[in-house]
Structures are given as C-alpha cells and as structure tokens.
Amino acid sequence: MKHLFTACAVFSSISYFAQPEHTAPVTHNAAQTVDAAANRSRSFSGDTINLPSTGFRDDFSYDDHRPDTTWWNLTLNPGIYVNRGWPLSPVNIGVCTFDGLDFTGMPYNALAPSNTSSPADELTSRHINLQSLSIGDSVYLSFWYQAGGKGYAPNPTDSLILQYNVPSWNSFSTEVWKTIWFMEGYTPQGNDTGFHLVMLKLDSASYFQNGFRFRFRNYASVCGSNDHWHIDEVFLKQTRSFADTLQGEPHFVYDMPSLLKDFHVVPGRHYVPSMMASDMDIFIRNNDDIPRNVTYTYEVYEPTSATPLFTYNGGADGNLQPFYTSGYSPYAPHANPNVTPFSYPGFSNPEDTGTYYVHHMLKKGTSASAPVDTVIYKQHLYNYYAYDDGTAEVGYGIYGSQALMAYKFTLPPNVTDTLKSVMMYFLPVIDQPNIDLREFRLTVWAHNSAANQPGTVLYTQYKYTPEYRYDAPNRFVEYTIDSGTVVLSGTFYIGWQQLAVDRLYIGFDFNNDQSDKIYYNTSGVWYTSIFDGALMMRPVFGGTYDVTGNDEVSDADQMQWYPNPTATELTISGLPVGNAKTIEVFDVTGRMVYNTQTQTTQHKIDVSNWNRGLYIVRVLDANGQVLGSNRVVVGN
C-alpha cells in the first residue's frame, strides 16, 4: 500500500500543503451510526454464561458490524467495529477494529489533537461461570492482534490492553479491572504485515469464579478513525496448552472479488459477456501446523433459484502447507479460479436491474462434508458503474485552487448512452473546517487517446458543494446532469474542478486498486494517483436508483425552506397536514443538533446561536419515513 498520511486536527505544516494528494481519517462511520440507531432497543440477556465444552470463541466472520451478543456485553456501548476492510492478512475473514470513534460512529472528542492518547473503544465479555474449573484444568485465553493493518498505525503513546475482572475484586460502587497484557503503539515495518498471537493461561485461583470477565481497551487519538488495532480469533477454553496455537481450519481471509473485470457494479443495460474477468484472486490460508487436504468450489445463483447457474469445481489440494511456512495457497485452481466460460445471463429487458449471488466454499478433504468456510458475493447489475466496494476506509482529496480531479471509465464497444448523474460519497473529515461550503464544478471530459489522459471538457456545471448524508451507511449523493446534454461512448472521465484550495474529501476504498484511473491536475499537468485504491464516485445512466435498496418517501417538492442561507431563523412550510411529524437537524459531522415534533403545517427554528456551516434538515412521519430533506446554510 502506498503512502498513508494521518490527520485529525487542522494542518498547518508546509509539507502537508506541498503534497497535492492527501488521505485523511474519516470522522464519521455511517455504518456504526446506522447500527447504533437500529439496535437502540436491541434486547440483551445479562445472565452469566457457562463456558461451553467447545470454548468461548469469536472469529468476527459475521456480517454484523457489532459483536455477537452470545459472547459480548453490548450494553456498555462499545465503539469497536467488526469489519473486513481494515486488516492485512487476518487469520480468517473479519476482525474487530479499535479506533477513535465511539458507539455511534462519531469521534469521542472531535477537537482532540492527533498526537494525544485517551481511552477509546472497549470490548467486554459477558459474565462467565468458571467456578467449576481450576488452574489444573489448563484454561487459556488466546487472540491475534495487528497494529495498523490497512489503516493508521498507532502512535507510540497509544496502546491495546487486556484486562480481567471477577466479582470478589469489586466493591459496592467500584469495579476493579486488572491489566493482564498490553501492547504499546508502534509503526509496523515492511515485513510485519501479519497478525501476532497472544496465549495467556488463567494461572490464578482468583479467576475461577462465577462472573469472570475480560475486556479489550485501546488508547488512541479520539478525533476520528485513527490509531487502529485489530483483533481476531478470541478463544477461551479449558484443556489447552501453550502449544495450542493454531485452530487447524482452512479459511478465506478477504471478501471475494467481483467476477467482472475492474467493476463491482455495471449497468444491466450495458452488460456484455466481455466484461467478465478471466479469473479471480482468492486468498486461502491453512491455519494448522501440518499440511491439509482442502477442496474449493464456487456456485452462481439467481436470487429466487436453488439451482446454480454455474458451478466451478477447483478440486482438492491435498497438500496445502501451513500459512506460516508457505503463505497463502499457491494452487492455481484455488488461488486463481477461472471465471470463463461463465457469463451472467443478463436480463430480457435491458432496463431491468438485478443481483446474482456467488457462493464460495471451502471443505476439508474430498468428501461431501459441510463447508468449513463460506463467503457470498453479491453481484449487482444496476444503472451505474462502480469500481469501489461501497465502503470508505479514508477520505481522498487534492490541494489547490482550481485543481482538477478526474476518474476514468470506459463503456463497452458499441454502447452509447446518456449520462444522467454522478454519484459521489463525500466524507466529513476534521482536516478542513467548513468543507461543506466549498464549491466545485461538476465536470465531464472526453479521452485524449494520444496522451492517455483527460482531454476536451464535454460538460461543466457550476456550482455544487459537498453534501453529506447520515441516515444510511456509505450514502451516495446524486449530482444531476442537464437532461440529454452528455451522450457518451468509449472512454470518458468524471470529476470536478474545485474553486478553493481546500481538499474536497471523497470516500476512498483501499481494497480495490484503481489508482491508474485517478487523475489530478494542480499545475496544468495531469498525473495519476500515488495511492492504491478506488474513488467512491459513480457515473449513472438511465433512470435514478436508490443505492440503499430502500424506497425513499419525499414530499420535499411541497415543502419550502427559507430563508436559505439564514443567520437568525429557518422556516419550514408546506408540511403535510395531519399526524405528528419529527424534524431533525444534523451538522456536518453528523451530530444531531435539533429534534422536535410538530403537528402544524409550518415550523420555525431559531438558528441565531448555531455555528456557521452546512446543516441537513429532515422531516419524518410517525413511522420514521423521510418526508423531505434539504441542505441549509447557516451564517452568523
């Protein structure tokens, strides 16, 4: 991975501004925000659990971004984040990440300097009954950890800590947590890209009580998604030994790639079989200390069918060596499975959109036993092109007044279509204040084939500002193109010309490298990006499509929001008659600053004491459906 810079507070150093390109930590994790709202009333049993004979084990391989309540106490509102995008070479797919964002996906302290360390995330086990066990039962707690990964390495003053607690240590008003293990922050070297194992024996009689707990905590810069630690494969079990370091199962370690070349999504109306990749890169590791016989297959399904459209049988690798001696599987039918001769059937109506499911499966041996690992990839054919996987690890921006940024796309041969809009996922970051007020020209370029770079400007529209949405994960905003004005074929570029020097941070996906398609121009010369990744910017063809998959209800055309901008009072008129309506206002960081209910058709909000900046105002019905929303600029 190429250069990764860290940022929290506003930069003032010369070196920062000398670098045209820059990435900055996100200061709002929309996935966590949505999870927090959806799980606000989530039930949780506080009962003590008995240690199963198979042990307490969590490998964080599930889709939920919050830990499994079978094992973890989530009533403490921990800020940890279960994900598949941040780790490098994990033990298996999925890790638990510790950073500087809280349970709601917001910074613990947005104004904290980036060089300070404070208590941040916490992951606490449920109460565990160990009173029937003793030191002689050889109970071990093990886990794997990594500093940084694909994210930001912890500062030297940061740390990851493991602590224990038992009821006999506590008083009526105080819980006593004792630190058992810790690791101070460090920047991993080039050869330190893996996870490190920690094996700890419960070697004190005081641990064996009804109500034993353990927790992981981190100290970090609490102004954003910084100072990453990742843990994997937490395992507590009796009758173990210090040599019991590996679990013996083969595993996938990353999300599956698309079966398409380059793209995760293409328009159904544009899809042609030539878009299919010839093969894929699959990463399989043997977590045992002896060779394993492993079988790999994948199957492609339509969503309503139990019969696969296509089955790839990679056969058995009878000699998959341990990862720590030989790395990932080099066996070509497993490491680089063929995609051809398969191609998606497409749709009988080219206006249709849809999804296919690709099931990747690992089995031990050659028998028909159940898979030991399964990962499903969803292949969308919608109405836009997407290089990115939908998740932003950082924000990407360029520095300079009138600077240009362009993103390269190529339509299939013989396809000509009208560009309807450009979807962009702008990220709020603390690197620049009032970034939401910075203006840009939405721009489309033709291809200069001689120079292999953006050429003639086909379209430019002034003026736009970055818009943020907080009501769904990875929320894209559509910036429309004047009807029928941009008809495209072959290669083209979408992007912007920014009017101020400040960077307009757009979501950046580290897990899909399209750096050769990212161009910037700050001095009259086009350059390709130095960063490995994909911009979260998507050209849209045909009708609009809600990327969340949810139908949005909007009566915004009947509503009026005035004056806008305003320094004293905002009036919302044209509200629907009848039942109670909720009015919410969010600032640029996604924090709710106003919330009320009204049954009137007009509502006034006093904004005279609000900070200058952009605010998102939403009106919801009694069921929480969005009736209308608007951006409002407050200037005082």
Image (tube, rainbow, N blue to C red):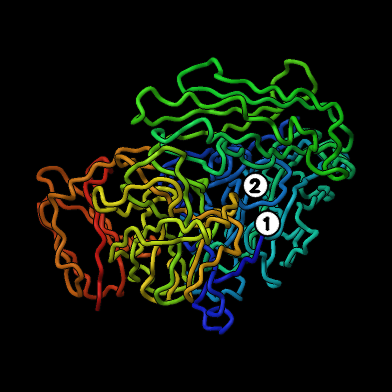
Task: Give percent across and percent down for residue 464.
Answer: 30, 64
Q: Is residue 128 visible?
A: no
Q: Is residue 204 visible?
A: yes
Label annotation for residue 95: 2
Q: Amino acid at mark 1?
A: Gly
Q: Is residue 296 above or below residue 432?
A: above
Q: Nearer the viewer, residue 359 or 312?
A: 312
Q: What is the x, y in percent for residue 131?
A: 75, 39
Q: Residue under circle 1?
A: 149
- Of the two numbered discs 2 and 1 in the rendering, the one whose residue sits closer to the viewer: 1
Residue 348 in which image quadrant:
top left
How crowded pointer 2 is (Cα within 10 Å; few <14, some 14-19, many 20+) is rated as many
Look at label 2 and name its amino acid: Val
Relative to 221, 581 lies left or right: left
Q: Are marks 2 and 1 in contact (CB under 8 Å)?
A: yes
* Residue in the picture at 62% in, 71% down: 117
Q: Is residue 269 left or right of residue 509?
A: left
Which residue is the extreme one toward the front?
450
Spatial CA span between label 2 and label 1 = 11 Å
Q: Residues within 10 Å of mark 1 (few under 14, many from 20)?
A: many
